[in-house]
Image (cartoon, coloured by chain):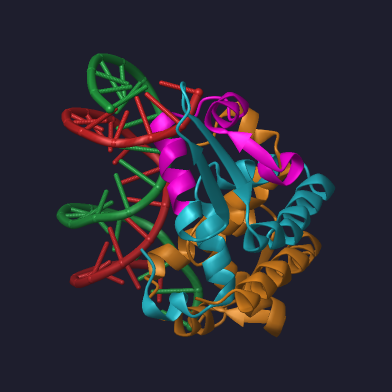
Chain colours: A orange, B cyan, C red, D green
Amino acid sequence: MVNSADTFCPVTRSAKILGSRWTSQILRDLLLNDSRRFQQLQTSLVGIAPNTLSDRLKMLEAERIVERRFYEDHPPRAEYVLTERGRALGATIRAMRDWGNKYPD
Amino acid sequence: MVNSADTFCPVTRSAKILGSRWTSQILRDLLLNDSRRFQQLQTSLVGIAPNTLSDRLKMLEAERIVERRFYEDHPPRAEYVLTERGRALGATIRAMRDWGNKYPD
DNA sequence: CGGTATCCCTATTGATACTG
DNA sequence: CAGTATCAATAGGGATACCG
């Protein structure tokens, strides 16, 4: 949980999103690919359980970072794309990646 | 925990550090102030328990993001400062802050 | 002052089976 | 295919008391 002081810190709000496991990888995939299917994400994020992926996508949808496009075909189809808010997180993801690359270990 | 695939993703390594609670605030304080005492941090991070602050500082020290300078005076004194690695995280913190400010809610 | 030592709680994550 | 339901494990975080 996060107390009320945290709630008003812009850094903490970003950390809350980027800190939960798998989210940074989901964002990385969507930044690179524009659109991804549920299965594609599950394949790319080796080891993620379907319920966890579902939870994470719902959280990102609730935060209006990803948009879910669902088509009731047979078999059904779902596509996830970044919103403008989501694409704007690219700068942070890149800063994180740059730091991680510069200081491996 | 983090699996082996995660370990090699630079974004994930950053997320591991920035994702745990209080770390982004600790870094923010140290980016603004050069040097902080244990008590100063505890006062600034309203609501943090001393063991949690201690854990977080040890983790940041293990990651060589902060340096601990301890003086055996009476009473004893400890100062925490960012290393070069730590200061380099400033770019990420700023990107997170900018995103959080641009998209409040 | 600058922490440790304990104990506890619950949020997060995951494995597995199943459904429209 | 795209998820949900259920149940279990554990790690993260916190409250409190105490120590050198």
**SS assignment for the magenta stretch, majority:** helix
Instruction: Determine whether B10 is above or below D6 in the image.
Output: below
Task: State which quadrant residue B14 falls in.
Answer: bottom right
In the image shown, does D1 or B100 lie closer to the viewer?
B100
| Picture residue at 62% right of the left edge, 47% below the top | B81
Which region shows up in magenta? B30-59
Query: Going 58% across and 67% down the picture, which residue do you hit?
Result: A24
Residue B74 in the magenta stretch? The answer is: no
**Residue at far front of view:** B73
Residue C20 position by quadrant? bottom left
Q: Which residue shows up at 57% across the image and 52% down it?
A: B66
Percent x, y of residue A104: 55, 77
User: Picture coordinates of residue A28 (x, y %)?
Assistant: 63, 75
Q: Closest to the observer: B18 or A58?
A: B18
**Left or right: A4, with A20 as reference point:** right
Is D18 placed left or right of B25 in the picture? left
Q: Position of residue B84 (x, y in %)?
A: 67, 62
Vertical relation: A105 (above or below) B46: below
Q: Residue at x 71, y 77 (%)?
A: A31
Q: For residue A51, say whether it is visible.
A: yes
Picture layout, residue C18 above or below residue C3? below
Image quarter hosting the N terminus of chain B: bottom left
